[in-house]
Image (cartoon, rainbow, N blue to C red):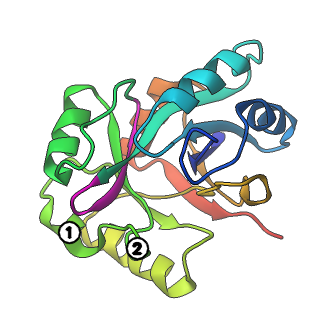
Amino acid sequence: MICADLHLHTRFSFDASISPTFLVESLNAHPVIKAVAITDHNTLEGYAYVQRLAAPYKDLVIIPGVEVTTVQGDVIVLGVKQNPAYWSSIESVVDFAQRRNGVVIVPHPYRGGGIRDAAKKIPNGLGAVEVLNPDSSPEENQMAGLLAKSANLPGVAGSDAHHIHQMWRGYTEIYADPKVDSILQAIKSGNVKPVLAKG
């Protein structure tokens, strides 16, 4: 099993300030979380930077990702190293991810920027729903959980950190080997457990 924060932003997001160097040092020092998905808004620059800095640390896993702005709201794509088209439809982003063996996660569906019930109109291709987000209210997280259940999708968690005091507040226990491909497959298979960190 590996614990992964599946939703974290670096300074390469327009609204975030976490430096890649601090992120890698913090991840290396964390007693539990050893994997992170870099999900900057509409760019993979942060992932590339963090991946280079983390290379000397053999027990850390950096998952490529991007939080994509679509016409219906935001979705996260994990496992890709190219940007989907900005401001496209969810359907085209799902197709983009499927052609590259990526995983599409619906983040904070019932909070600002979320796709809300539009997720119910995507017949297949979604990989998981973020059911625990520290910045969402308990009611919004509960609605996200119901969405995941109704769509028969796994529930995951991430910190959605944009600043250092928000890091590692949410993560996902993933029953997989500490490798990106294994982690992505475990998410698709539902071998996951979302966790909100205490404190």
At a point 24% along the width and 38% down the height, the residue shown is 85
Judge by depth and name the residue closer to the eye, 16 or 141.
16
The x and y percentages for residue 182 are: 48, 28
Q: Is residue 71 left or right of residue 31?
A: left
The three-letter amino acid code for the residue at tag 2 is Ala
Answer with mark 2 or mark 1, whichever residue precedes in sequence.
Answer: 1
The x and y percentages for residue 164 are: 77, 52
Task: State the residue position of label 2.
Answer: 144
Residue 1 seen from this side? no
Q: Secondary structure at mark 1?
A: helix
Query: Is the N terminus in the top left, top right, bottom left or bottom right quadrant?
Result: top right
Q: Is residue 83 left or right of residue 107?
A: left
* 56 versus 134 height, above or below: above
Task: State the residue position of label 1.
Answer: 118
The x and y percentages for residue 194 are: 57, 60
The x and y percentages for residue 115 are: 29, 67
At a point 20% along the width and 34% down the height, the residue shown is 96
**Alpha-carbon neighbours of circle 2 within 10 Å: few (<14), some, or many (≥20)?**
many
Tell me if residue 105 is in the magenta stretch. no
Q: Residue furthest bottom?
A: 139
Q: Is residue 78 left or right of residue 1?
A: left
Question: What segment is highlighted magenta in the picture?
Answer: 70-79
